[in-house]
Image (cartoon, rainbow, N blue to C red):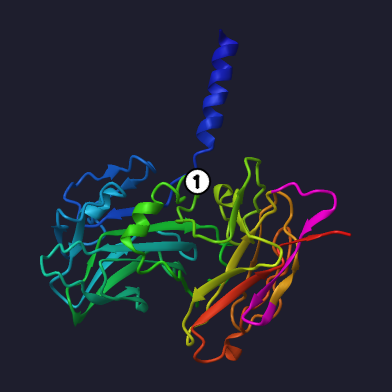
Amino acid sequence: MLLLALLLGLLAVAAFAQIPSTSGFISIDCGLDDDSGYKDQVTQILYSPDEPYTSAGVNRKVSPSTNLTSIMRYYANVRSFPDGTRNCYTLRPLVRGAKYRVNAQFLYGNYDGLGRPPTFDLYLGVNLWMTMEAGDFNRSEIIAIAATESMQVCLVNTGNGTPFISELDLRPLLYSMYTQVDSSHSVVMLDAVHLELSICLSLKKLSYRYPADPYDRLWFPVPLGRGISTNDTVKLGDGFGFQAPEAVMKTAATALSLSESLNITVQGNPDVPTYLAMHFAELLRLGANETREFNIYVGDSLFFGPYRPKLLLADFVYTLPPGQKGGRPTPFGPRPTPLYPHNQCPRGVHRATANLDADRRERR
């Protein structure tokens, strides 16, 4: 009986250890009236009301016709800031010099009955993070280093409507992740803003976040080529780079045929350097006379290759910060290569198209 109890105890400890820690997580349901907060039923993450992070603003409910609480509970309400030009949340306690990802979401939901979503500026400390343009739903993520034991996220009224926010969260990252970020440079996620509500609804059951991703990043599928997957274990990296979760690395897209390519268009800004990270793993056990090899092009220029993904081994290729020479190789594979050195990025180029060519070739 004692042996059985010990075995059961070991199993319980092993199962508990698989759940990533939420230590350092800050999760705010903006506009929540309940002072005690709550635990999300899906992620088991604890959400808090606006206090003690801000005392400014008023709580408002979105229109009953906007019923998105089936996605997340925090879409039922907003924190609105009708008074003052600049209103801030102070996120603390943090670790000075540590790396964090901050995510902000904005569901207008006609909470004010005006039917006119506002446009306003979002700041991280004294630095402009993003202009939140008029739309029923926006979200934006930024990765930055904490200069002190706190960070301030500020909504600034620019005269184009009353600023508001639905949800604000902060997640600690390993310092070895996202090497483009340092004490002088932050990185803002592209394509995080202006996500259509219909996409949110359709992707609810298909996307991954915590606990599948211990850093609570949102991963969602996009239609691309032909999907492949595996039930085998995919070995991940050692903490360097981007740490795509195993659930994400178990699925992939491949070209429909040997004569076709995978084309990915990334929106960008000609005045701001754009970074790109691509994750790879061979998920299929190829025949003795087969190999998967391809080149990656940006426009008509060779970006990287030829490249062969490794069987059930997560790998990535990514761009370097402007002006950085060379770069450390990824834990298992290729050396990172610049997409465009900033001083050579053609002005007026708003898009970079990555072309993954020649997906599989037969060995002769």
Q: Which residue is found at the position 40% from the left and 53% from the top?
A: 203
| Apparent side of residue 249 relative to residue 326 in the rendered image (left or right) | left
In depth, the one of 74 and 358 nearer the eye is 358
Q: Quadrant of residue 319?
A: bottom right
Which quadrant: the C terminus?
bottom right
> Residue 57, percent across and down?
16, 65
Q: Is residue 55 visible?
A: no
Q: Which residue is mark 1?
A: 212
Q: Quadrant of residue 120?
A: bottom left
In depth, the one of 25 and 208 nearer the eye is 208
> Residue 254, percent across and down?
64, 58
Which quadrant: the N terminus?
top right
Crowding at dot 1, Cα within 10 Å, few <14 / some 14-19 / many 20+, comes out as many
> Residue 208, percent across and down?
47, 50
**Region of the chain picked out in magenta, as a range:** 284-302
| Apparent side of residue 359 relative to residue 291 in the rendered image (left or right) | left
Give above or below for 205 relative to 174.
Answer: above
Q: Which residue is found at the position 46% from the left and 62% from the top?
A: 100
Q: Is residue 193 visible?
A: yes
Q: Which residue is found at the position 20% from the left and 52% from the top?
A: 32
Q: Residue furthest top?
A: 1
| Apparent side of residue 184 relative to residue 258 in the rendered image (left or right) | left
> Amino acid type of disc 1?
Ala
> Residue 165, percent across and down?
25, 64
Q: Residue furthest left?
A: 113
In depth, the one of 290 and 109 nearer the eye is 290
Give above or below for 49 relative to 88.
Answer: above
